[in-house]
Image (tube, grey):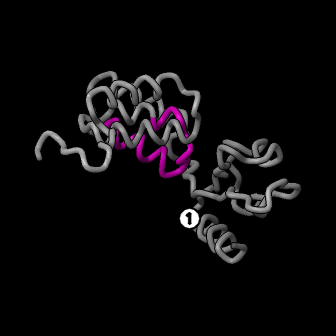
Amino acid sequence: MIESLEALRHEAMAKGMQLYILVHPDACPVCAMHRGKIYWADEAPTLPIGGCLKHDCKCEYRPYDPNGPTLDEMLKNGVDAVKARKLDTAQEWLVALLQIDRFNEQAWLWLSGATDDDQDRLDCLTKVIEINPNNVSAQRGLATLHARGVGVSLPAGEPDETG
């Protein structure tokens, strides 16, 4: 782990990048205090973060371009594109954000609206629920998909409509 962090730090410094700390949704309170923080490579704390209360800390770093859009701007651009029904553009923005922060609940939720494919929508909404089981919008979306038979498994031995 330390070798990979050192390699990431070295690469980030060489490219003028920063490091975004990706904090797992069920992180301990010590790690949770670092959620959303961005560090210059030479200032990034070693992982696991000192004082971490979990023996299996899942925090990690992602490269972040300080000259590019902020994560909030990426989300806003994605949301605006969804609202304008520019789904390809929305997907580009939201996927770029999720490459940095794969636990971004709002990005997954909006990405579910940036697709016309029910299976992709199901996958996105499932990610939202994994991050926040209490997300009402995702619960409603999943219920709608399930009512249409998307993502609902048939009990063993029951034929589907095609068979």
Kind of residue indicated by mark 1? Lys
Query: What's drawn in magenta, residue-wise?
Result: 89-108
Dominant secondary structure of the residues highlighted in magenta in the image:
helix
User: Which element carries disc 1, helix, strand or loop?
Assistant: helix
Q: Residues within 10 Å of mark 1 (few under 14, many from 20)?
A: few
Q: Name the residue under label 1.
A: 15
Residue farthest to the right? 51
Q: Residue at x 69, y 56 (%)?
A: 59
In the image shown, does 51 or 146 lie closer to the viewer?
A: 146
Image position of 108 with respect to 10: above or below: above
Q: Which residue is drawn at 53% across and 48% down?
A: 102
Verify whether residue 137 appears in magenta.
Answer: no
Judge from the rendering whether residue 110 lies leftward or rightward of residue 23; answer left or right.
Answer: left
In the image shown, does 58 or 163 lie closer to the viewer?
A: 163
Image position of 156 with respect to 135: above or below: below
Residue 72 in the image: state x and y as whole percent.
54, 33
Residue farthest to the left? 162
Residue 10 in the image: state x and y as whole percent.
65, 71
Image position of 109 with respect to 51: above or below: above
Q: Which residue is drawn at 46% across and 28% down?
A: 138
Judge from the rendering whether residue 52 lies leftward or rightward of residue 118; answer left or right.
Answer: right
- In the picture, residue 92 is in which quadrant? top left
Q: In which quarter of the image is the N terminus?
A: bottom right
Judge from the rendering whether residue 11 lies leftward or rightward of residue 113; answer left or right.
Answer: right
Residue 141 in the image: state x and y as whole percent.
39, 26
In the image shown, does 30 or 79 lie closer to the viewer?
A: 30
Judge from the rendering whether residue 117 lies leftward or rightward of residue 107; answer left or right.
Answer: left
Q: Residue at x 77, y 48 (%)?
A: 31
